[in-house]
Image (cartoon, rainbow, N blue to C red):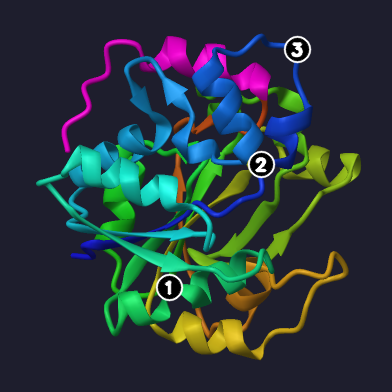
Amino acid sequence: MITTAVVLARGLGTRMRTEGEKDLTPQQAAAAASGHKALMPIGEHRLIDYSLSALADAGIRRAVLVVAPEHEEFREHIAQLRPSRLEVQFAVQAEPRGTADAVASAAEAVGDAPFVMVNGDNLYPGEGIGRLLREERNALLGFERSALLSESNIAADRIAAFALIEQADGRLERIVEKPDAATLAAAGPDALVSMNCFAFTPEIFAACARIEPSPRGELEIVDAVRELDEVRVIPFAGGVLDLSRRDDIDEVERRLAGVEVAL
């Protein structure tokens, strides 16, 4: 069983700062302005509290949070939480150079252990994470598009832009980023979508070191995944909560109302 998780929590929060009409509380406005989406107040907790609690429920016993050098607020928050169900460590990504660089920044903290990788501004279903924890090889959780539409807080037009997963006999063949309308139609409503939820062996670190920046100028985890010899695809029918924009906050709060946080 995998017991380590790497949580990418360095994001700049550009959309959170600029997109949406929702009026925020002073605490939420401060989190949005700082780009700390994972520290967004949701009810009585922060989003990262729900994420860590769900990871612990699934079987994670060590979480490595990838943060920016100036994100001392993360350390202060975790110190106040004093989690006992899992150990929380930090890895610093010096510059915002992309998701593959963020993963590479966690190499020393992770060591030789296999791990799952998740986004800090998403809340993933525990059942799906639990399936990844049983993997012995590199693997990708593929979310059925129809289930994402019905069980997530993510609008259909946003889901349509997410990367599609092409597989054969449970093995990843291709990840199609920003698919066009014809590709979406051909894939069908139950096509598998990538939500950046992976299980990795330590070989991912060497793969991250081999890639070049994408046209966006970033080191992308998708390009590192393409460097791996084999990646299993695990289909999953379920939703993901996303906190990318200010207008996401109300719906995330509504769906998490009454959810117990145990750290």
**Crowding near the residue tagged with mark 1, few <14, some 14–19, many ≥20 C-alpha atoms within 10 Å:** many
Residue type, label 3: Glu
Question: Which mark, by number, is residue 21?
Answer: 3
Q: Is residue 258 magenta?
A: yes
Query: For this rendering, which residue is in front, 5 or 46?
Result: 46
Which of disc 1 and disc 2 is earlier in sequence? Answer: 2
Query: For this rendering, which residue is in front, 204 or 102?
Result: 102
Q: Specify the segment rendered in magenta.
A: 246-263
Residue at disc 1, secondary structure: loop
Residue 155 position within the rendered picture, expressed as x and y whole percent measured from the top left: 69, 22
Asked which quadrant contains residue 95, the reply is bottom right
Question: Which mark, by number, is residue 13?
Answer: 2
Which of disc 2 and disc 3 is earlier in sequence? Answer: 2
Q: CA distance from mark 3 to mark 2?
A: 16 Å
Query: For this rendering, which residue is in front, 25 or 196?
Result: 25
Residue type, label 1: Ala
Residue at disc 2, secondary structure: loop
Q: Going 36% across and 82% down the picture, which residue do you hit?
A: 108
Which of disc 1 and disc 3 is earlier in sequence? Answer: 3
Residue type, label 2: Gly
Asked which quadrant contains residue 61, the reply is bottom left
